[in-house]
Image (cartoon, rainbow, N blue to C red):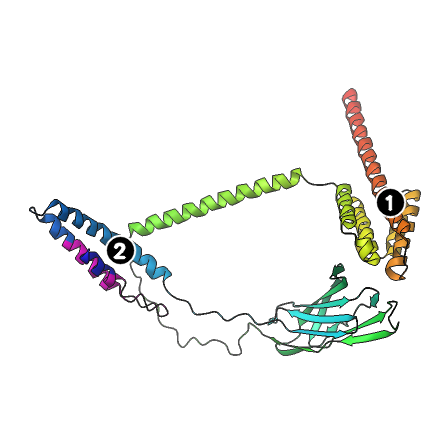
Amino acid sequence: MTIFNDGLRSGMCGVENHDGCHWRLASGSSGASGSLSAAARVGKGGQAAHGTRTSSRGRVWAAWLLLAVLPLVVVFGCGRADETPPPEPPRSEVEKGPVRLSVQLDPAAPTLADRPTLTVTVDHAPGVTVEWPEFGPQFGDFRVVDAREELPGVEDDREIIRWVYTLEPMRPGRATIWPVDVAFTDTRPDGDGRRHLISTKPLAVEVTTAVEAEPPSLAGLRPEASPVALPFSRLAVVLWTAAILAVVAAAVYIFRRRRLHQTAVAARRLTPAEIAYRELQQIIDDALAQRDVKLFYVAITGVVRRFIERTTSIRAPEQTTEEFLHEISVRRTFPPEENRRLKNFLEAADLVKFAAHRPRQETIDASLDRAREFIDARREAMAAAAERENRETIETKVEAKEVA
């Protein structure tokens, strides 16, 4: 195996220099060719022993194996320089009494064409009333494009409120986001009941642009080079064919998996009433009424509003109670009795959400019952309407056949 070891050492010459990727393939080729010629000479000797012929075949196979593995080492052995980690997004966080306020801008280094988002998060103890931070059309060196409030949450017995503002840079260079002011009132039993103001620090960010300061120069362009003939390689054809077949097989597999997934999703699609029942059961399982009654009423009214949106196309979750009741009254979406029950249900919930009303346990249970009764009534009404429409369609077809 001396010839194979020499060829291997020659073929791997220069592999240790990963960063520069300077490979001396000539040495590997010469080592492999030397191995082949040595194996050929041994094979031609008619008086060599049987063990010598077997060893010669092993050397020839080892040389071919070296030639097959060496290009893969060249391709995958080159080292890469460490990439610099992305910059941290600008952030400011302050705390005052029972309230923690934080703001964060994403991405950390926006361009002039980006629309970064400013996330304002308020983390406060239960019983504290927080006011929406109002921005003008311009906030620092940015223009306010859009603003939305996400659904509130609870973490470690503290309420989480989050507002997301979409901004637009007004100019490249160093830009500033003004401090964010949030007002809150401590209405807890042991609170002072006064209105307080908490403010973050201003954020500084560098806005870049894809337009260069100076136009590129064409003076350094070299003349076009003459065509270079590429050597024909059967190995390259085989590898490319195998790669194309693998890509096609992967595409067919992904397509079939996606079709099966879509079929399964369509088969188990739930009705609006079933979705609402599941959401109500989740509220009960989470014991939200025992942890925070305000968030409990926010959750159950959200279930009813989303159910109405799925069944009537009314944007109920985005409207106030007064706007919603006015729209269903004008459109006559529900019968008068359902309108009255829905009005009582929503107004009772608003007393808890906005007027700090503390309902009793039987009142909480009654609110859940009203939500279920409304969903049941709407489900039965929609089923009856569908059956009536189906019957009318059948009668129309029968009459058309009789006339024909």
Magenta-drawn stretch contains 349: no
Report the amino acid beneath label 2: Leu
Q: Position of residue 13 (x, y in %)?
A: 27, 65
Most foreground residue, 247 or 188:
188
Q: Residue at 77% across / 63% down in the picture?
A: 159
In three-dimensional space, the C-alpha distance between marks 1 and 2, rounded to whole angstroms, equals 78 Å
Confirm or deny contact between disc 1 and disc 2 (CB under 8 A).
no
> Would you say 375 lies left or right of 139 here?
right
Quadrant the N terminus occupies? bottom left
Q: Position of residue 73 (x, y in %)?
A: 33, 59
Occupied quadrant, residue 288: bottom right
Report the amino acid beneath label 1: Asp
> Would you say 350 lies left or right of 124 here?
right
Disc 1: which residue? 369
- Secondary structure beneath label 2: helix
> Would you say 210 lies left or right of 328 here?
left
